Each structure stands twice: as structure tokens, then as C-alpha cells.
């Protein structure tokens, strides 16, 4: 409809001004009601989003101070208690996740898009597996992390890097799917041109396809990271549970905490001061995620225009 | 002196691939394949990490006891293992979340695909994505401190019988409704994709025959996209089954076979989250219980997801 040319518009105007009308005359009550119901259903989500943001902002604003970022958690002096160990812990966990998911996710995507022959049974199994992993409940990854990473073969113990690997397994499908879409968006003519000039398949992939896919890969990575930052359930199982009064020694030793886990632990305490603290933490977390997601959405919208 | 390269006839037929056998390239391809195959390894890892302790669990507890009607109290001194009580909790959460997520998700998808103009869609889609991006723990706080008390204070106590009883601090309706809102974007995006795949020509034909917008939406687009819409519903239910934190925070901790909206319940996920955070020692039956419940949870969601994947593939095949 939006692409109607000048001539069409003239014809439509002529038709609508004539006595015979294609439109139905009168108000379509049922149709308008239907539209209202649809509008209501989409507004429900939007209104709830707004309510949630306003609620968290009001509830948490009392404790949105510098102590929140610089202080250790304390049961005695709740008024100045802060998120410092959780912030440090989340930083460690997220760095570990980032350095794991980018190479693995991009490599898997390159294989599936550029090399895999879709008629082979093993490639089809890989595809179905990725789709299925994307929908496995997050807490199941926690169980896997507990059995294979904290204990079992890797035996890392309850350390930040165990959390990193657990979250990495969880968000890997997100990165793979996004990277595949980005790679698929590169026009095949570019590949043909590169191969025609004598480049090998890998040279074509590395020098032509991947550089053009960077915006899409970055978007997917940010979305995956924002999912990982907010995730609580699997971390409960792989160690980020204890009331940590100190900073983790490193990513590979010492107990750690993470922002969402800290929020959860404070929120379920009966005292109101802790709940305010939890809401303040939630406010910070939501703000961080809004920034990350908006950036990802903006980047995606920008990169779409190119071809 | 100019050197001329003569391509000998033996090189024919020409191929764009280089002739030199580059070993490095093969190593790279092997690495890429391994990275992709990691997805399969993770799935195998999940299955192994669940099955081995589950076998240990069923050495101590008979399978009949697990699926019997006895109470769910695996951490007590005299443990009982009637898993049906926490399966019922999961079912109750599924029911109350789907009251919101399925109709609102489908409605949002129809609105975005058939009613919203491109500009409106550009606003709505990121909003839904932000809704999807809010961490579950924040939804948990919202359910526990806002929706829960709001419902409790305004509970219709004039209703007869059990339904009129004021709920406690944590109850299934508060968690279910918030979870429902949380799942709207999942349902909406999958349903929207399937409606988007319905060819324009079908709509144009219906309009040409004098259909209203509502008729096109309900009699052409929705039936054509039906398998995708069912897939979106299935995925929405699967997310409700797998969600942990909101349920853990707002739905209570009492294993209960109930569908009353004002009762507290315990779900499979909440049991795992609650038990694994406590001081639970490795090798005890209580420890293995976590894995047995995890295995049941994984089996449930795996079945459901496979159905959804098959359905999504069907709508893709029809129009592509």
C-alpha cells in the first residue's frame, strides 16, 4: 500500500469519490472490537513493562547511592551495605563467558553456513541440537555445570570461571543463531568474486565474509551477554550462593557472587531494608541491560541498511 | 622479457578452488566442525550428567515410590518421594501463565503482522525485546513485592468457598501472571514470524473478495500460520515449565496438588533451585533427588521442544 505510485493514487481517489465504493459503508463494530482486543493484548505487555520499571525505580531509589557500588554486603549495617563483591564477581563471570562464546559461536556459525553440507545426517543433528539447546531450561545447565564443570571431569570447584562456562553453554545457541544470520546476509556474489580472484574458501571467509558479518555478530553477542548477566538459576547451582563478604581472589579460585544472585538472596529475606537493597540492585541491573539491549537493537537496525 | 604462463590442458576442467593442498585450511575446517559439534557434546553432557545420578537415585528409591501419590518430602528424616506433587505445581504454573501469555502473545502477533504500520512495528518490536530482556530475578521482585501484595489486598473475599480465602504471602496466581507477561514476547515473536511467512497474495486475494481486515486476520492469516502459532504456544508452555526464579520467589514452597489460584505450590524447577542452594552433601539420596527431578524436567521440555521444532519446520516448508 505504501508503495503506490502517483497513477494508482489518482485511480484510487477517483474510485473512492465515485458512487460505487469498494469499502463497506458504516462502522464495522465487530472489526473495531477485534482491533481493540488486539491493541489491548499488546498494550498489556507494554503497560506491565512500564509498571515494572516504575515500581523498581521507586522501590530502589532510596538506596541508589555510592555505597551500593563500593561497599561489601553486611547484615549488621544494612544501610550502607553494597554490591561490590557481586559486581566484581559478575565482571569475572562475564569476561569468562565472553572469551568462550565468541570464538566458539562464530566458528560453529561459519561451519554451518559456509562448509556444512545440509544433506549429511551429522550436520542435521548439529542443527537440531542447537535449536533444542536454545530451549533447554536454564537450571538444567546449572545441573550440567555442577556435574561436569564444578565436579566431575573439569573439577574447577565453585569458582567464577565455572559460572562462566555454565552460562557460556547456555547462551552459545544465541550467538550461533545470530552469527549465522549475519553470515547468511553477506551476498553470495562477494564470495564468488573472491573465489574467482583465486582466494581459497577460508581466505574468502576470513577476509570477505566475516568482516561484513561483524555488526550482526556483535549484536548477537551483546544480546547473549545481556541474557547471561541477568541469569540467576544456573549460578545458584554452580556456586554463586554463599553470602560473600570479600572479593573473589581470581576467576579460578575463591568463592564468588553475582549481581542477580545477590539480588535474589536479599529479596527473599524478611527485613524490609534488604528488600529495598534488592530493588536498588534490580534497578542498576535493568539500567545496564537497557543500555546493552538498546545498543544491540540500534546496531542491528543500522547494519541492516547496508546491502 | 615478459614471461607468459601457459595453462596446460591437464589443468582443465577449471575449478575456482585452489589446487595446492593447504593443510592449514583443513585444520581450520576441523576446528570449525568441532565448534559446531560442541552443541551435540553439550546435549550428551546434559544427558549423562542427569542419567548417572538418576540411576543412583533409583537404587535407593523405587520407581513406583517416585511416581506414587505419597507426599513430596525428600529432605525429611523419613523421606517420601511422590514426585506428582511437584509436577502438579509445574502444571498449575503452566495453566496460570498461559492464561496471559497465549492470548496476549497471539494478539500481539496479529496486531503487529496485520494492523500495525511499519512505523508502529518499529516501536513495538524493540519494546517486546526489552520485555524479553528484563532479568527473571527482576520479574521475581515484581511478583513478590508488587503483584502479589496487590492481588492479596484486593482479593475477592466475597467469593464462596476456597476461592474466597485470602492468599498468603506467596501463591501461584501472582507468580503465574508475572510469568505469563514474561513469556508474551516468546509467543509473540514465533507467532509473528509464522504470520509473516504467509504469502501476501493470500491476503490480497481475500481483500479483493471484499473481506474486512478482521476476516483476513482470523480466516486467512491465522489458519495459514496455524502450525507456527501452535509452535509458539508450545514454546511458551515449555518456558513456563523451565522457569525457576520467579516461581522460586513468588509461588511458595509447599508441594501441593492444587489448581486453586490462592494456594502456594512448589514446582520441579523451584525444588532444584531451593535444594541445590542449601547445604546439601554429595552422595546422599537428597542430592540425587535433584538430578532425578532434573531428568524429568529435561525429558518434559525436550519432548515439548521437539514438537515445536517440528511444527516450525512445517510452516517453513509450506511457503518457502
Image (cartoon, rainbow, N blue to C red):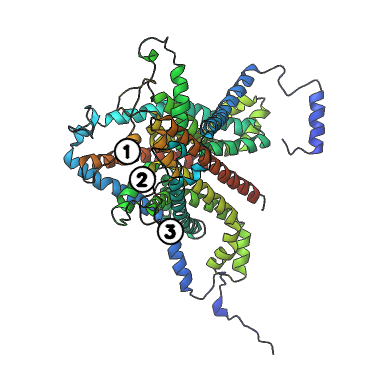
Residues at discs 1 and 2 both on one chain? no
Circle on res. A142: 2
Q: B159 above or below A33?
A: above
Indicate the chain on which mark 3 is placed. Answer: B
Q: Quadrant of the N terminus of chain B?
A: bottom right
B224 sits to left or right of B275:
right
> x%, y% of residue A272?
43, 29
Circle on res. B35: 3
Q: Are marks 1 and 2 in contact (CB under 8 Å)?
A: yes
Q: Residue at x 59, y 60 (%)?
A: A211
Q: Nearer the viewer, residue B288 or B305?
A: B288
> x%, y% of residue A227?
48, 44
Q: A199 above or below B183?
A: below
Circle on res. B125: none
Compare marks 3 and 1 and give the one earlier in the sequence: 3
Q: Is residue B97 visible?
A: no
Q: Residue at x 61, y 28 (%)?
A: B216
Q: Are marks 3 and 1 in contact (CB under 8 Å)?
A: no
Label 3, label 2: how far apart the Cα atoms are: 21 Å
Q: Nearer the viewer, residue A4 or A164?
A: A164
Label 1, label 2: how far apart the Cα atoms are: 10 Å
Q: Residues within 10 Å of mark 2 (few under 14, many from 20)?
A: many
> x%, y% of residue A77?
42, 38
Q: Which residue is mark 1?
A: B272
Residues at discs 3 and 2 both on one chain? no
Label 3, label 1: how far apart the Cα atoms are: 30 Å
> x%, y% of residue A212?
61, 58
Q: Residue furthest front?
A: A77
Amino acid at each position: 500500500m505504501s508503495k503506490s505510485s502517483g497513477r494508482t493514487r489518482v485511480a484510487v481517489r477517483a474510485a473512492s469519490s465515485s458512487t460505487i465504493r469498494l469499502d463497506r459503508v458504516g462502522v464495522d463494530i465487530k472489526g473495531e472490537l477485534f482491533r481493540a482486543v488486539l491493541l489491548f493484548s499488546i498494550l498489556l505487555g507494554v503497560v506491565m513493562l512500564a509498571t515494572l520499571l516504575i515500581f523498581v525505580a521507586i522501590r530502589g531509589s532510596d538506596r541508589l547511592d555510592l555505597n551500593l557500588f563500593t561497599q561489601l554486603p553486611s547484615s549488621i549495617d544494612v544501610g550502607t551495605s553494597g554490591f561490590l563483591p557481586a559486581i566484581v564477581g559478575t565482571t569475572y563471570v562475564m569476561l569468562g563467558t565472553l572469551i568462550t562464546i565468541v570464538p566458539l559461536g562464530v566458528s560453529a556459525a561459519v561451519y554451518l553456513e559456509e562448509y556444512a553440507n545440509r544433506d549429511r545426517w551429522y550436520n542435521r543433528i548439529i542443527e537440531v541440537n542447537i535449536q533444542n539447546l536454545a530451549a533447554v531450561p536454564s537450571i538444567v545447565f546449572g545441573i550440567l555445570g555442577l556435574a561436569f564443570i564444578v565436579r566431575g571431569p573439569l573439577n574447577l570447584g565453585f569458582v567464577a570461571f565455572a559460572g562462566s562456562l555454565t552460562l557460556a553453554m547456555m547462551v552459545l545457541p544465541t550467538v550461533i543463531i545470530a552469527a549465522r544470520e549475519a553470515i547468511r546476509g553477506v551476498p553470495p556474489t562477494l564470495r564468488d568474486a573472491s573465489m574467482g580472484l583465486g582466494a581459497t574458501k577460508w581466505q574468502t571467509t576470513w577476509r570477505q565474509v566475516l568482516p561484513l558479518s561483524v555488526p550482526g555478530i556483535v549484536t548477537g553477542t551483546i544480546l547473549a551477554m545481556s541474557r547471561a548477566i541477568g541469569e540467576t538459576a544456573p549460578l545458584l547451582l554452580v556456586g554463586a550462593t554463599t553470602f560473600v563478604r570479600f572479593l573473589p581472589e581470581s576467576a579460578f579460585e575463591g568463592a564468588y557472587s553475582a549481581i542477580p544472585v545477590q539480588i535474589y538472596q536479599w529479596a527473599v529475606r524478611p527485613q524490609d531494608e534488604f528488600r529495598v537493597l534488592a530493588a536498588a540492585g534490580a534497578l542498576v541491573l535493568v539500567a545496564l541491560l537497557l543500555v546493552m539491549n538498546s545498543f544491540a537493537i540500534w546496531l542491528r537496525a543500522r547494519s541492516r541498511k547496508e546491502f | 622479457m615478459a614471461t607468459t604462463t601457459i595453462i596446460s590442458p591437464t589443468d582443465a576442467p577449471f575449478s575456482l578452488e585452489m589446487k595446492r593442498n593447504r593443510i592449514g585450511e583443513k585444520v581450520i575446517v576441523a576446528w570449525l566442525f568441532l565448534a559446531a559439534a560442541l552443541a551435540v557434546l553439550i546435549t550428551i553432557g546434559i544427558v549423562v550428567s542427569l542419567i548417572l545420578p538418576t540411576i543412583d537415585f533409583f537404587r535407593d528409591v523405587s520407581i513406583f515410590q517416585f511416581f506414587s501419590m505419597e507426599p513430596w518430602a525428600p529432605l525429611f528424616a523419613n523421606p517420601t518421594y511422590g514426585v506428582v506433587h511437584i509436577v502438579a505445581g509445574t502444571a498449575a504454573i503452566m495453566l496460570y501463565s498461559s492464561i496471559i501469555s497465549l492470548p496476549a502473545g497471539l494478539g500481539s502477533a496479529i496486531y503487529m503482522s496485520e494492523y500495525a504500520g511499519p512505523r508502529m512495528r518499529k516501536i513495538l518490536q524493540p519494546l517486546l525485546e526489552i520485555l524479553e530482556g528484563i532479568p527473571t530475578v527482576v520479574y521475581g521482585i515484581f511478583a513478590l513485592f508488587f503483584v502479589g501484595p496487590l492481588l492479596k489486598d484486593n482479593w475477592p473475599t466475597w467469593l464462596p468457598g476456597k476461592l474466597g480465602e485470602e492468599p498468603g504471602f506467596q501463591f501461584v496466581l501472582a507468580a503465574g501472571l508475572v510469568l505469563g507477561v514474561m513469556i508474551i514476547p516468546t509467543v509473540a515473536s514465533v507467532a509473528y514470524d509464522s504470520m509473516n511467512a504467509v504469502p501476501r497474495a493470500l491476503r490480497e486475494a481475500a481483500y479483493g473478495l471484499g473481506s474486512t481486515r478482521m476476516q483476513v486476520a482470523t480466516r486467512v492469516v491465522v489458519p495459514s500460520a496455524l502450525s507456527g502459532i501452535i509452535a509458539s504456544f508450545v514454546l511458551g508452555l515449555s518456558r513456563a515449565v523451565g522457569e525457576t526464579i520467579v516461581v522460586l520467589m513468588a509461588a511458595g514452597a509447599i508441594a501441593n496438588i492444587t489448581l486453586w489460584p490462592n494456594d502456594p505450590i512448589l514446582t520441579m524447577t523451584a525444588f532444584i533451585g531451593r535444594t541445590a542452594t542449601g547445604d546439601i552433601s554429595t552422595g546422599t539420596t537428597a542430592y540425587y533427588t535433584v538430578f532425578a527431578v532434573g531428568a524429568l524436567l529435561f525429558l518434559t521440555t525436550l519432548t515439548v521442544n521437539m514438537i515445536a521444532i517440528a511444527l516450525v519446520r512445517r510452516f517453513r516448508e509450506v511457503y518457502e
